[in-house]
Every structure is written in structure tokens, then in C-alpha cells.
Image (cartoon, grey):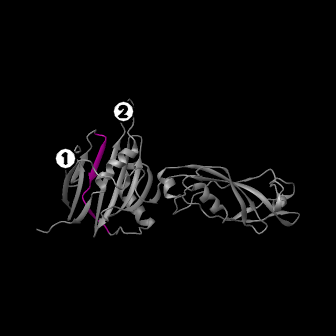
Amino acid sequence: MKFRGGALVAIVLTLLLAARSISAQGTDQNVHPATQQGLVPPTVLQQVKPQYTAEAMRARIQGTVRLRGVVERDGTVSNVEVVRSLDSQFGLDAGAIAMFKQWRFTPGMLNGQPVRVQVVVDLTYALRGVAVTGWPPGFDAAREADSRQEETVESGGLRVHFRRPADWVALARSTATPLMLRSGDGLLTMTLFAPTQTSIQLSRPVTSSQVEDLLKADGGSGAPLTVSGQVDSRPGLFWVWAERRSSRQQSWTYFHTEGDRLVTLTCAQETPPSSGPPPASDTAAGECAAIVNSIEVMPAATP
């Protein structure tokens, strides 16, 4: 089951009706197993979707948490506990518990009377193009290049100034791509595209429809989108970004608007031959961070 507009894109809503009763202590002695003969099990009336925490998304945690709870006679849920944990460090288990307590059911019925029934649910967290607030996984918001070289590019009525590592090499420029840089090891490429006119104004908060419009226009060369987000950078620029992955490449695209102009730049990491070890994506994101953190965008000086 998919929910729109949230980070949680997949919930396996399988009610695994428990085959045993809860230990007979206190009020729990009246909880019935769902397999009890003659019992009509509860059915879901209202679901509340769980949400990813930013930390869990950055850690790229995916999988299923199994919860057990009791559907009360009024259809509310109590006594929720984790049967199979997914994440106790970044808040996914705790978030799933809080969410499940907000569900509402028709009560279980036995001999025409509502009774308390134990149920189990599986909730699956999956990252597929979700949006987060903050930088991409592995991005270091405080990183600066150890040895820096100043670069200024004027294109489309804007001036883009930034600092890059001294060992990065400038490649051929064109009208469409006024600047291309490649890392010293040849595995990373940073491309600044010529600003284009846009009606979108990127400022906080950015709506999901605006993010979708940007990603549709970008396309990412057909590579699957893994995660997207939005963030204010250190110089005060607001960015929307998208991370894409394919078997040959991982890339990060950053979008910013200045007036009616859209600034787009991409950092791409090529996958090396299978004979060599793959580069760490966190390292690649960090290298890109050293450049993105330094960027300043302003109107070009009029002649």
C-alpha cells in the first residue's frame, strides 16, 4: 500500500492475527486470540502513516518492523510492543509504535459482544524517491576544500562564484555547460549548466509539487531517483537536490533559483571497472560538498 506525500512509501498492511492469548495478568486476561472459534476479528477503519526520521533516511534504513497490540472494545489500540525490530537507534521502531496507537478498528466480536483481540501488523519502510530536509547522505555541511582555487562563471545573466580543490581539472566549456570540473582521480565530475528561465521560486518551504516539477524537468538521464530533499546552505542559498543511482553512476543534482533564473549543477561519480574497489559514496558526496558549500550566486554585472 502506498501513501502519497510522505517519506514512507510502502506499508505492508498485513494483519497477522495472533494465534495465542496474552499472559493472563491484570486486565490482559480478557484478551482473546484471533483464532478463537466463533470470534469475528477486527478490521481496519483508519490508518495513520508512519514517517521516516531524517536520521533514518540518511542512514538509508529500509525493512520491516513487526508490531503486536490489542484492539480494544471501542476499536482503539493499546499494549503495543515490537515483535521484530527494524531500527531502535534512529526512531523507526518508536515512530511505528506511536503511529499504530492512532489506528482505529471495528472491534472484534464474540457471541455478538465486542471483545479485546490481539493483532500483529507488519510495516515496511522503503526509500524510493522520498524527500528529506537536509543534505544528501554523506554530505558534510561544514566541509571545505583543503587547497582551494577560486572560480567565477557568468552565464544567463548570473554570476556564480565558488571554490574548488586545486587538483580538480577544468574541462571544455560550452554555452549549455559554462563550467565542467573533474576530480584528480577522474571519478568525479561537477557540471554547472547554463541558467534557464523559470516560474518556480525556491524558498522555504518548497511544496512537493515544485520538487516534482524540477525532477521531471531534470530527468537525470533516466537514472532511478533514490532520494531527494531541500536545504539551506551555509551562504544562505536554498537548494533542492536529488540523488540518482544506476549500475554505472551515482549523481547528485542541485537546484537554486535567483530571480527568474534556475541554477542547476550536478556532481556525478562514475563506477570504476569491476577489477577495482568501488569508491565510497559518502566520500564522493563529501568532495561535492566542498564545492557546493562555497557557492555564491548573484546577478551578473551590467556592462
Q: Residue at x 62, y 58 (%)?
A: 96
**Magenta stretch encompasses residue 82:** no
Circle number at residue 273? 2
The reply, left or right, for residue 219 in relation to residue 87 is: left
**Magenta stretch encompasses residue 189:** yes
- Mark 1: give few (<14), some (14-19) or many (20+) Cα within 10 Å: few
Residue stretch rendered in magenta on the structure = 186-198
Q: Which quarter shows the N terminus?
A: bottom right
Q: Which quarter shows the C terminus?
A: bottom left
Q: Would you identify the image quadrant in which residue 142 lies?
A: bottom left
Circle number at residue 54? none
As helix, strand or loop, the secondary structure at mark 2 comes to loop
Q: Amino acid at mark 2?
A: Pro
Q: What is the x, y in percent for residue 140?
A: 37, 52
Q: What is the x, y in percent for residue 280?
A: 40, 41
The reply, left or right, for residue 132 in relation to residue 269 is: right
> Are dots 1 and 2 in contact, CB under 8 Å?
no
Name the outermost residue toward the right. Answer: 111
Q: Is residue 150 above or below residue 297?
A: above
Q: Residue at x 84, y 56 (%)?
A: 24
Circle number at residue 172? 1
Q: Is residue 278 above or below residue 212?
A: above
- Mark 2: give few (<14), some (14-19) or many (20+) Cα within 10 Å: few
The reply, left or right, for residue 98 in relation to residue 55 is: right
Q: CA–CA distance between discs 1 and 2?
A: 25 Å
